[in-house]
Each structure stands twice: as structure tokens, then as C-alpha cells.
Image (cartoon, rainbow, N blue to C red):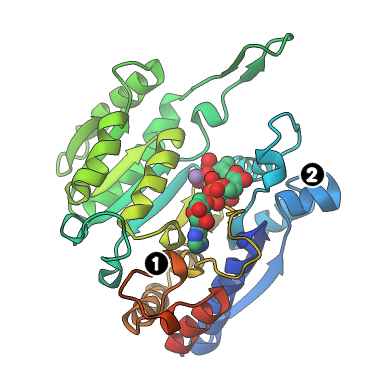
């Protein structure tokens, strides 16, 4: 028996629009092949929404999100705002608001290298082979949501780094539970030697260790973690960290998977699941049709598994991506000196290859 699911697609800005087409097509193909009934709606967010309504997250999009079973998101952002920090209404506000409103406090970012991409990374293959890390990035707290201030003379500014015990506890529990199903290792990353918010973080994780005695816990400072990640990525299994540290570490960790264009994520919490690549709208390549669609496609795979419990279908998508890479097909971000010219392709050709391999 197939399942009935309502999916909201929010392509957003820049390459978000180009890649999300393929995440959606993959979901459509899975629905056909496995006789599921997925219905799709679209919503606007980010720069496109500001242009259309003046609001980066129109109420209509938020309403649709609340009524859906899962959300497939692309990316938001536009050079206009990046180049003018004085603009008050900004695309990123839409993304932060939807995360907060939907209670999406846990952002899962799996870092898994397809063997075919060993040569695509800037890190040596022997360091990378076998790396498999699952990040739990806290997503609705930290400096992102603490009080922001600017003095009247505009010369001084501050962002409050704030965490409550319950916020640390709920994300840490998710990370501990995940570690139990994997290699039973958890690394909690903070800056407890300097920050009070991090000392709370560490206290809360340490208290939980007593409940999860089967999980081996390591506490690491963020500066060291950033270094260990490229020195020896295989030492990590599950990593749990705050919003800001998690943002930075996972962009760094994308090099373990070969490219930003490979990393998918799932944000979960109080209700609906939200699926998105970790990358942004990529002004430098937007509109050129060369962005890697695999992060969006792999985000769709996470949706099938986590929100819909469709493990086989999810695995089928991952296998189709793997088969496409095995055939030698590459977007330019994951090509290397050994990739032949005719196998380097744009977004649409790459997406189409994955669909062929799905069928
Ligand atoms: P970015 O992630 O957009 O791009 C960083 C680099 O990675 C660029 O060189 C880009 O070309 C490359 N890249 C990213 N995705 C790729 C893909 N699928 N295929 C090939 N190459 C890819 O980060 P940025 O340049 O710092 O930010 C650009 C804009 O995106 C900003 O406005 C920022 O605020 C926004 N942003 C949004 C999100 C999001 O919506 N979740 C995430 C990050 C950044
Ligand atoms: C991400 C992005 C966002 C973040 C920005 C665009 C608000 O970098 O999803 O990783 O910092 O969370
Ligand atoms: Mn980021």
C-alpha cells in the first residue's frame, strides 16, 4: 500500500531554484515507481518573496508549511543584501523564522563520502576513505536567536549567545540516541574554556552521559574540532554542537564528502520535517546551470526515510546517486583531473542521469 503525503517545495533563490527541481523530480519518480501519492505545493521565501511581497517569509508560505507532511527547501540569499549590511529586510530572516516557527531544533547533517569521490576532495584519499560522520547542529538557539543590539551612534554592536538547559538537553538526547544506532561514539563540541553558554552546554551533556553509559563521549573545543576534522575525520562518529559552531564545522566537513554540492540535511523537532542542502544560493554560479543537484536529491532521500519512514525508497535514491557517480558523471564541483570532459555536465543533465538510474 502506498502512502499519501503532502510536500511543500520552497525553491528559494539562486541555485536553490535550479537544484530543487531535481529533488522534487526524484520524489515524483519514487511516488510513481512505488505507487505512493505525493501531492506538491510551492511556496516562496527569501529574496524572491521580498520582491513579491516585501516579506522574506510570507504568512501564506508558513501556513502551507504547517499543513504539509514535509518540506523540501533549496536555498535563500542574494548578493544585494550580502553587499549592503544596512538593509533591514533580509532573505536569511525568512529561513531563521521558519526554523523557529516550526520548532526545527535539530539539524542533522550526514557527512558520507561516496568512494567514487575520493579524488574530488582537497583532502588526501587515505585520510578520507571510510569517513562517516553525523552532525547534530542545534538550530533554534545560540547567537542566531539571542538579543541583537546596536548603539544609537551605530558604533557598537552585540549578539547574545544564549542557551537554555532544555535546548541543550533535547538536541543532545537525539545525538546520543543516534550514536547508539551507529558506532556508539559521541563528540560534543563547545568552547567551555571561555564561554558561559558552552559551560552550560558541557554540564548538560555530562549529566546525560550517566544515562547513556553505552556511548563513549568526548568533549572537544571548537578550535581543536575544526583542526581534527581535516586531520583525521575517521575519529568522529556522531558530533553534537551549537548553532554557530555547527554551521561552520559542517561547511568545513563538506570537503570530506567532496563538495558543498553533496551535503544534504534534515531539520526536525516539534512537528514537520524540513529538508535542505547545507549550501546557499551560490551567487558565483547561479543562473549558469552548473550547480550540483545531488545535495537536493540526497535531501529528498532523507525526507523519504526520516519523515515518511520509507527506508527502501530512500536507499533506492542513494543507490541511484551512487550508480550515477560510478558511471563517471560529474558536475564541475566534483570533477577532477581524471574526469573526462564529456562526463562533466550541468545541473539538468546530472539530475536526468539520476532519474534514469532510478527507473
Ligand atoms: P554558498 O553555500 O552559497 O556557496 C559557497 C561556495 O560553494 C560557492 O563557491 C558555491 O559556488 C559553492 N557551491 C555551493 N553549492 C554548490 C552546488 N550545489 N554545486 C556546486 N557548487 C556549490 O555560500 P556563500 O557563497 O557564502 O553564500 C551565498 C548566499 O547564500 C548568501 O546570501 C548566504 O546568506 C546564502 N546562504 C543560504 C543558505 C541557505 O539557504 N540554507 C546557506 C548558506 C548560505
Ligand atoms: C545554513 C545557512 C544559514 C545558517 C544562513 C543562510 C542563515 O548558512 O543553513 O547553513 O547560518 O544557518
Ligand atoms: Mn551554513
From this view, report whether residue 180 is shown above or below residue 190: below
From the viewer's perspective, is 130 left or right of 313? left
Q: Secondary structure at mark 1?
A: helix
Q: Is mark 1 within 8 Å of ligand 1?
A: no
In the rendered view, tell whether residue 295 sits above or below residue 176.
Answer: below
| Residue 40 appears left or right of 163 | right
Residue 55 tag number: 2
Element under disc 2 = loop
Which class describes the residues within 10 Å of circle 2: few (<14), some (14-19), or many (20+)?
many
Residue drawn 40% across the image and 35% down it: 245
The nearer-to-camera label among 1 and 2 is 1
State the residue position of label 1: 334
How packed mark 1 is, by other alpha carbons closer than 10 Å (few <14, some 14-19, many 20 or more), is: many
Dots 1, 2 in contact, CB < 8 A? no
Query: Up-down: is 98 above or below 200?
Result: below
User: Which residue is pictured at 23% across the width and 31% down the height?
Assistant: 219
Instruction: Report which quarter residue 160 is drawn in.
Output: top right
Left or right of residue 287: residue 88: right
Q: Is residue 234 visible?
A: yes
- Camera-side residue: 328 or 5? 328
Give the image location of residue 349, x and y in percent.
53, 81
| Place of residue 321 in the rendered image (x, y in percent of width and height, measured from the top left) | 39, 76
Point out residue 254 in the picture as x, y percentages from the top left corner: 37, 53
Task: Depth check: give the residue in front, 352 or 121.
Answer: 121
Left or right, residue 112 beside residue 141: left
Q: Quadrant of residue 315?
A: bottom left
Residue 99 in sight here: no
Cα separation, mark 1 vs mark 2, equals: 36 Å
Disc on res. 307: none
Q: Earlier in the sequence, mark 1 or mark 2?
A: 2
Q: Position of residue 248 (x, y in %)?
A: 42, 39
Vertical order, 204 against 50 (above or below):
above
Amino acid at each position: 500500500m502506498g502512502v499519501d503525503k503532502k510536500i511543500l517545495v520552497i525553491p528559494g533563490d539562486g541555485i536553490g531554484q535550479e537544484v530543487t527541481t531535481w529533488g522534487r523530480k526524484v520524489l515524483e519518480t519514487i511516488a510513481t515507481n512505488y505507487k505512493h501519492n505525493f501531492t506538491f505545493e510551492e511556496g516562496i521565501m527569501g529574496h524572491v518573496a521580498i520582491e513579491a511581497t516585501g516579506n522574506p517569509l510570507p504568512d501564506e508560505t508558513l501556513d502551507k508549511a504547517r499543513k504539509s507532511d514535509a518540506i523540501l527547501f533549496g536555498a535563500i540569499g542574494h548578493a544585494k543584501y550580502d553587499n549592503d549590511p544596512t538593509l533591514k529586510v533580509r532573505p536569511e530572516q525568512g529561513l531563521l523564522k521558519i526554523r523557529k516557527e516550526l520548532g526545527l531544533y535539530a539539524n542533522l547533517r550526514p557527512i558520507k563520502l561516496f568512494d567514487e569521490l575520493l579524488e574530488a576532495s582537497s583532502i588526501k584519499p587515505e585520510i578520507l576513505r571510510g569517513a562517516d560522520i553525523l552532525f547534530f547542529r542545534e538550530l533554534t538557539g545560540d547567537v542566531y536567536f539571542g538579543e541583537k543590539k546596536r548603539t544609537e551612534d551605530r558604533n557598537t554592536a552585540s549578539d547574545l549567545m544564549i542557551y537554555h538547559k532544555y535546548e541543550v538537553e533535547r538536541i543532545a538526547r537525539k545525538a546520543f540516541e543516534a550514536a547508539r544506532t551507529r558506532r556508539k561514539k559521541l563528540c560534543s563540541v563547545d568552547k567551555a574554556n571561555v564561554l558561559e553558554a558552552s559551560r552550560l552546554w558541557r554540564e548538560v551533556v555530562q549529566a546525560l552521559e550517566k544515562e547513556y553509559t553505552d556511548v563513549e563521549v568526548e568533549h572537544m573545543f571548537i578550535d581543536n574540532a575544526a583542526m581534527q576534522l581535516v586531520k583525521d575525520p575517521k575519529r568522529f562518529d556522531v558530533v553534537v554542537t551549537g548553532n554557530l559552531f555547527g554551521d561552520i564545522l559542517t561547511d568545513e566537513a563538506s570537503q570530506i564528502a567532496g563538495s558543498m554540492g553533496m551535503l544534504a540535511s534534515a531539520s526536525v523537532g516539534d512537528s514537520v520535517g524540513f529538508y535542505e542542502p547545507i549550501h546557499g544560493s551560490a551567487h558565483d554560479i547561479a543562473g549558469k546551470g552548473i550547480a550540483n543537484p545531488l545535495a537536493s536529491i540526497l535531501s529528498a532521500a532523507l525526507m523519504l526515510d526520516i519523515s515518511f519512514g520509507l527506508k527502501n525508497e530512500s536507499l533506492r535514491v542513494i543507490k541511484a546517486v551512487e550508480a550515477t557517480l560510478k558511471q563517471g558523471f560529474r558536475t564541475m564541483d566534483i570533477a577532477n583531473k581524471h574526469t573526462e570532459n564529456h562526463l562533466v555536465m550541468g545541473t539538468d543533465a546530472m539530475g536526468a542521469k539520476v532519474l534514469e538510474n532510478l527507473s
